Amino acid sequence: MAITTPHRRRSALSRSLVAVAVWLAVLSGSLVLMPADVAGSPSGAEAPWRWPLAPVPRVEQPFERPATAYGRGHRGIDLSAEEGQPVLAVADGVVTHSGMVAGRGTVTVRHSGGVASTYEPLDDRIAEGTEVGAGVTLGRIGSGSHCEEPCLHLGARLGEEYLDPLLLLTRVRIVLLPLLPGTARTP
């Protein structure tokens, strides 16, 4: 009968934590984000949303979840754009807001499942209450952006929870790799 000492228990716990950390690093390194318009996905799965600008824009600033409900963060993504460029609905839905917020033109569209997409700054906005299909023009990129150059701020919410819109615009392909070389099992 082996007697376990606190040192041996900590050592075993440390090895377990290292193994979990390595596994998570390998798994996270094996996730591949692909733009939704890339053809030839092995799974054939489409992203839930389409890009709100054509051609597919560059992401200027990514989503940054705030630590608290009112904390600092970036509750959406900023996409490169040209002033006056048409902004398209990311999915079918109903316009639940079209107006000014903090001096900027904004539009909110409620989609199936309760997810809402938000767009700013928009000029020539579509009317509140309008049913829209994916790809319908909601407005045009206006001035007053919080970016240095014109951009579209695209947000996503489910209830009061902010979501990363990029995850709705891309397909995620998971590739599982062996944890360590030589650990693959054969039947």
Image: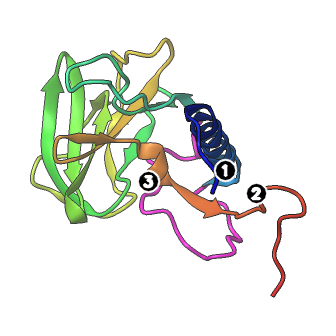
Q: Which mark is nearer the camera, 3 or 1?
A: 1
In the rendered view of the protein, which quadrant contains the N terminus? bottom right
Residue 16, image x, y percentages: 62, 46
Extreme residue in the right direction = 182
Mark 2: few, some, or many residues within 10 Å (few <14, many ≥20)? some
Residue 18, image x, y percentages: 66, 40
Q: Which mark is residue 125?
A: none
- How far is the residue under mark 1 from the one under mark 2? 6 Å
Q: Secondary structure at mark 2?
A: loop
Residue identified by numbered label 1: 23
Give the dominant element type of the magenta stretch: helix, strand or loop. Answer: loop
The answer to whether residue 95 is left or right of residue 145 is: left
Q: Which mark is residue 179?
A: 2
Q: Secondary structure at mark 1?
A: helix
Q: Residue flagged by tag 2: what amino acid is it?
A: Leu
Which residue is found at the position 11% from the left and 47% from the top?
128
Mark 3: few, some, or many residues within 10 Å (few <14, many ≥20)? some
Disc 1 to disc 2: CB gap under 8 Å: yes
Which residue is found at the position 21% from the left and 43% from the top?
108
Tell me, yes or no, whether the highlighted magenta stretch contains residue 101. no
Query: As displayed, is residue 33 above or below residue 178?
Result: above
The answer to whether residue 143 is left or right of residue 85 is: left
Residue identified by numbered label 3: 168
Q: Secondary structure at mark 3?
A: helix
Pick whichever of labels 2 and 3 is earlier in the sequence. 3
In the rendered view of the protein, which quadrant contains the C terminus? bottom right
Q: Which mark is nearer the camera, 2 or 3?
A: 2
Magenta part of the protein: which range? 35-58
The answer to whether residue 8 is left or right of residue 85 is: right
Quadrant assignment, res 126: top left
Residue 51 visible within the image: no
